[in-house]
Image: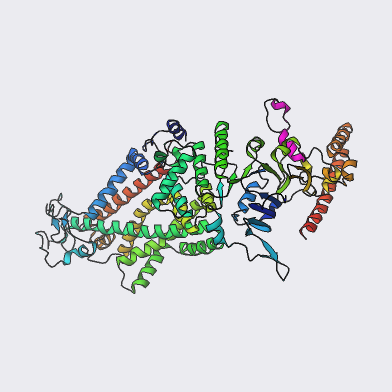
């Protein structure tokens, strides 16, 4: 606050945004100051980059630098059923170990899976599934939870009671069971990754709703809410313009942490057979198929596990850093 | 009264209560006052007297568990709040009362605007000052975004903010307290309302800034002719800015007078006590005469006169009789009202009885004299306890009569 006063005295021209204790640029610089958070951000950026612009041509299932460009999520998922696919030299040789192994080959740096598919390619494409799953289902929970929580907290009374009891009912059911039941029922017995995403998203609505509600309960007592009411702003607009933007920060932090959890849960679902279906490469499903080969080729289990570990670590470290950056008490 | 035109705002017997688990809090208990055009009316009292609740009731902005339970609020001939007795004897909202939607779109912001106490909290921290002001203007006046922006910059200039075009783009935290209060004033004035409720607008500011803001309001008031309800606990501010004053104590208006009259011919002991507790350059702190005790809870107000437990002039009768707000004098053709039985024409009871304070001193003295036997002291205390219990019962009966 003293900072603001000092700037006031000059009262000429806008003051430096960097010095302000609000705003994206300030938060970003705060995150970058924190070493672990910075590395978290790097990992997140890398995973996002890989999943959006992979440099591996899915048709070839081997490293061909530069041949990226035009693929979409749906097109690339069944990557090994592509009609024009040229079988790579290594294919056919099942369960090849990684390149650094005596029996390995450089054309399959991480080896091949039991069907002879290049494992590195599958890990990279698995990132696409995992990250989109993590982000989309967290987004579903985030948006749904924010709306429910904000409405519930702002209006209070009966609306609050009804919404919160509903949310708590969902909250009381073990998430994995809820997701599996949802996935199986909605998909009509043929589970797919889309239903898993939806199911996980819905399961997370209660958590987000409760966080944002508790935040709204304090925000709604602020004078600017009262001022908005006194100047005749519609309740809907008060929620949209004043309540949600001001109770946003803790949920945002939670969402970044939640992306990691979601990836883990969907990996678990795929492992159990309710998530991504073969031949879609998904880290959890890859773990599932590889666990029968633990003795013959242990690397098949290690690579997807490592990928999950690193990605989740990245999101968590970034989320932690974001939390610290947004917490004014730590900012001194 | 008849010499003047109809008031801009008339409040009659307004009662706002909060229904809490601990009981009914009678935050505003039957207040009546008027605001005429171009006038600054003060609403003065200690914290918890019900000033803010009263002013929010005028916009029907009382949140649950609070509720306006009785009274009438008329603004420019329109009924903001009004009740009538239905055929079944219950009170119903009158048909000519504005709906929630009408109050929101036509009254709030457009006709009656509010300036809040804490300028630090009254602006949304995540949007620029300009965008908030512009949004507010767009909302209440039919202007395009560009016009509203121009208007917003003009308003910022009007309230004395330097470089308004540049400050427009800044966030609230980049403004000092005084500057923010100027922004809030700009916001309140932006839609050219006829009445502005200023809820302790200078309390959070330091004294020099307070002076500037008061000057600014004075200038703007002269220019726009806006009426103000100035809620404050600071008698100094009242003296400086108000035309007429309502002094509130525990949900009731105890004295109502033009400002000079109030200061030079104070009629109510509470007002007098407030004036005596004001620091002045000609008196040291030791000479200050603060009001003893704290204001009781509005949940169970004292019987009789609500001020009697703290009143230096209280008599036995004050414990029983709830004084009505009567006209006790006239000044400049305006009434001076006070709610104190001191001024009752048939106030024999007051004149004849002993001041409670003296009596208390006598009992205290006798208790210490017979200090060796502690039992007697305890006895006298328990006696007085049961006595007050009786009176409070009588008081609640009395209150019940009132309601009927």
Q: Position of residue A177 (x, y in %)?
A: 40, 66
Residue A212 visible in the picture = no
Residue A281 rendering spot, x and y as whole percentages? 23, 61
Residue B188 located left or right of residue B376: left
Task: Decide which of A109, A16 is in the foreground and name it.
Answer: A16
Give above or below for A135 relative to B380. below
For the C terminus of chain A, the image quarter is top left
> Does residue B394 appear to the left or right of B72 in the view shown?
right
Looking at this view, is A225 or B146 the one in front?
A: B146
The correct choice, above or below, for B101 with respect to A310 in the image is: below
Give the magenta part as a residue range: B267-292
Q: Is residue B287 magenta?
A: yes
- Residue B137 in magenta stretch: no
Q: Is residue B284 above or below residue B114?
A: above
Q: Position of residue A300 (x, y in %)?
A: 22, 57
- Residue B55 vs residue A63: left or right? right
Residue at the location (17% across, 53% down)?
A55
Residue B301 visible to the viewer = yes
């Amino acid at each position: 606050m003293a900072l603001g006063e000092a700037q006031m005295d000059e009262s000429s021209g806008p003051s430096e945004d960097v010095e302000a204790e609000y705003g994206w640029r300030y938060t970003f610089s705060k995150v970058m100051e924190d070493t672990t958070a910075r590395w978290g951000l790097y990992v997140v950026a890398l995973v996002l980059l890989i999943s959006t612009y992979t440099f591996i041509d899915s048709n070839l299932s081997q490293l061909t630098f530069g041949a990226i460009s035009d693929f979409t999520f749906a097109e690339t998922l069944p990557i090994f059923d592509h009609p024009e696919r040229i079988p790579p030299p290594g294919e056919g040789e099942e369960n090849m170990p990684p390149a650094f192994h005596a029996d390995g080959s450089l054309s399959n740096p991480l080896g091949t899976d039991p069907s002879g598919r290049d494992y590195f390619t599958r890990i990279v494409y698995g990132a696409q599934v995992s990250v989109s799953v993590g982000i989309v289902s967290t987004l579903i929970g985030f948006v749904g939870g924010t709306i429910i929580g904000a409405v519930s907290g702002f209006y209070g009374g009966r609306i609050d009671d009804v919404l919160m009891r509903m949310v708590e009912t969902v909250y009381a059911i073990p998430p994995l069971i809820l997701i599996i039941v949802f996935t199986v029922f909605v998909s009509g017995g043929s589970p797919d990754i889309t239903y898993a995403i939806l199911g996980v998203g819905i399961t997370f609505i209660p958590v987000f709703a409760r966080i944002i509600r508790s935040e709204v309960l304090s925000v709604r007592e602020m004078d600017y809410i009262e001022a908005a009411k006194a100047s005749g702003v519609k309740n809907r607009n008060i929620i949209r313009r004043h309540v949600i933007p001001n109770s946003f920060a803790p949920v945002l932090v939670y969402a970044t942490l939640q992306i990691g959890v979601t990836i883990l849960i969907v990996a678990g679902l795929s492992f159990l057979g309710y998530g991504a279906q073969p031949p879609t490469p998904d880290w959890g499903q890859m773990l599932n198929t590889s666990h029968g080969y633990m003795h013959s080729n242990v690397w098949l289990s290690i690579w997807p596990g490592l990928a999950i570990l690193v990605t989740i670590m990245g999101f968590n470290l970034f989320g932690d850093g974001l939390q610290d950056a947004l917490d004014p008490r730590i900012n001194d | 009264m008849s010499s003047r035109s109809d008031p801009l705002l008339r409040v009659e017997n307004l009662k706002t209560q909060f229904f809490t688990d601990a009981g009914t809090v009678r935050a505003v208990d039957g207040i009546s006052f008027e605001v005429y055009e171009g006038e600054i009316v003060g609403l003065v009292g200690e914290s918890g007297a019900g000033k803010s609740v009263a002013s929010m009731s005028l916009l029907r902005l009382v949140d649950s568990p609070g509720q306006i339970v009785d009274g009438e609020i008329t603004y420019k001939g329109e009924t903001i709040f009004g009740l009538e007795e239905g055929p079944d004897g219950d009170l119903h909202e009158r048909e000519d009362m504005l709906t929630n939607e009408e109050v929101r779109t036509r009254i709030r912001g457009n006709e009656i605007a509010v300036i809040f106490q804490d300028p630090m909290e009254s602006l949304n921290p995540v949007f620029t000052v300009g965008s908030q002001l512009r949004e507010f203007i767009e909302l209440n006046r039919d202007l395009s975004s560009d016009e509203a922006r121009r208007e917003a910059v003009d308003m910022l200039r009007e309230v004395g903010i330097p470089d308004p075009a540049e400050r427009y783009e800044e966030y609230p935290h980049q403004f000092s307290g005084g500057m923010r209060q100027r922004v809030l004033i700009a916001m309140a004035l932006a839609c050219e309302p006829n009445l502005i409720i200023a809820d302790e607008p200078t309390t959070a500011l330091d004294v020099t800034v307070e002076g500037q803001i008061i000057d600014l309001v004075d200038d703007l008031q002269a220019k726009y002719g806006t009426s103000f309800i100035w809620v404050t606990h600071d008698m100094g501010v009242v003296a400086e800015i108000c035309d007429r004053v309502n002094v509130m104590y525990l949900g009731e208006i105890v004295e109502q007078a033009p400002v000079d009259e109030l200061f030079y011919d104070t009629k109510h002991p509470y007002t007098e006590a407030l004036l005596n507790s004001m620091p002045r350059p000609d008196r040291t702190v030791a000479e200050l005469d603060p009001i003893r005790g704290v204001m009781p809870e509005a949940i169970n107000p004292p019987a009789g006169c609500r001020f009697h437990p703290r009143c230096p002039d209280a008599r036995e009768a004050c414990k029983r009789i709830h004084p009505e707000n009567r006209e006790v004098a006239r000044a400049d053709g305006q009434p001076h009202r006070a709610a104190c039985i001191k001024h009752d024409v048939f106030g024999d009871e007051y004149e004849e009885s002993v001041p409670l304070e003296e009596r208390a001193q006598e009992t205290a003295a006798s208790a210490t004299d017979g200090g060796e036997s502690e039992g007697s002291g305890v006895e006298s205390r328990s006696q007085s306890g049961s006595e007050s219990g009786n009176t409070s019962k009588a008081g609640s009966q009395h209150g019940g009569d009132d309601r009927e």
